[in-house]
Image: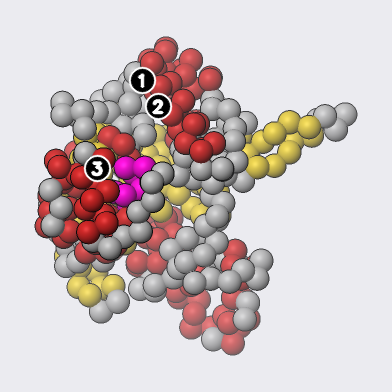
Amino acid sequence: MKTWKKIHESPALWDRYFVREKVIRTIRSYFEKESFHEIETPILIPHPPAESYLDVFETTLLDRNRKPTKAYLSTSPEVALKKLMVAGLGDCYSLTKAFRNMETQGKLHNPEFTVLEWYRVNADYFDIMKDCEKLLLALAGGTTLIYQKQKINLTPPWERITVADAFKKYANVNFNEFFDMDTARRVAINKGYKVEKNNTWEELYNQIFLNEVERKLGHGKPTILYDFPAAVAALAQLKKDTRYAERFEFYIAGLELGDCYGELTDPVESEHRFDFQMKEIKRLGKTAYDYDNDFIEALKVGLPKCSGIAVGVDRLVMLLADTTSIADTLFFPAGEEFNLHRV
């Protein structure tokens, strides 16, 4: 049944859908008080960010003579915001639509979604952790959140745990040893995962992380999972121990809500990482495209030291509406509109 029909038959459902209005208002109020600039970033772009884990929407832009040019729907406002920061914008955020293909199934994804992304200049990822704590307090209207009968204490500071410690605690994996490819393969096989000869280290990591670690985070109190392996932190600054990068994600009730980097500012290193991501996109058989050379030029001018985060607004709404599916918070979810089967 279409959502409008459900609401027509059960008007009480309006309350659930109106949670989104409150969330949007509260987000804008928070960043206005923090003196951030709100930026409208483009949806139709010539170059998506170089991220091999994403599938993009490709389309065609026609000029007046119907000459075609490849174009894409934005997967993130990141590059646009960073270019403006190079120009001297300062602290900024975007509350916009983003698009990721191959995300029509499951309760936690919709191919068109709302993303909140913000950046602080002269800040590190620990500063963004504090932002997350304050923003969630504002959204919840207090220190307690009830989600699926589970009481979540939002009082700062939240639990903080490194990826290495989380792998040891929840999966009984010694992460320093797991960096070795042969060891990672052996650990995954011993745990019963399907391991093939061409599996990358990242794929082995994700098998264990998604099945044994992620779902255990953020119960009773939000969890900030930080210091990710560099192999899964494309545009993050490396730490002194260069096996790790300045990246964190935050979780509530096993639900990942935000992904933060201490942003990489070096243009040479960025170009190397983009090249690697492009090779991965081709290896995986995904839609190939050229990365944004204009962004490299901007980085050469100088991106200021900064840290930023992307937060899934639909998941925030889902959390605050106390439902387990993003589709329950959207008037026109893709699965419903395109008659797609969700699992």
**x, y percent for residue 222:** 20, 59
Assign the N terminus to one quadrant of the image: bottom right
Asked if one can make out residue 19 in the rendered structure from this viewpoint, the answer is: no
Q: Position of residue 114 (x, y in %)?
A: 49, 53
Left or right: where 195 falls relative to 220: right
Mark 3, Cα crowd under 10 Å, few <14 / some 14-19 / many 20+, is: few
Amino acid carrying label 1: it is: Glu
Question: What's the distance in space between the residues labelled 2 and 1, CA to CA?
Answer: 6 Å
255 relative to 116, above or below: below
Is residue 203 rendered magenta in the image? yes
Quarter-of-image position of residue 42: top right
Marks 2,3: beta carbons within 8 A? no
| Residue at image location 47% in from the left, 39% down from the top | 52
Tag 3 secondary structure? helix
Which label is found at residue 182?
3
Q: Residue at x 21, y 35 (%)?
A: 244
Mark 2 or mark 3, earlier in chain: 3
For this orientation, the residue located farthest to the front is: 197
Residue at point 15%, 52% (across, down) = 173
Contact between marks 2 and 1 (CB within 8 A): the answer is: yes
Q: Locate residue 87, reporting x and y percent.
A: 44, 19
Name the residue that disc number 1 marks. 269
Precedes in sequence: disc 1 or disc 3: 3
Amino acid under label 3?
Asp
Name the kind of residue labelled 2 in the image.
Arg
Of labels 2 and 3, the one closer to you: 3
Q: Nearer the viewer, residue 57 or 79?
A: 57
Residue sitting nearer the eye, 240 or 218:
240
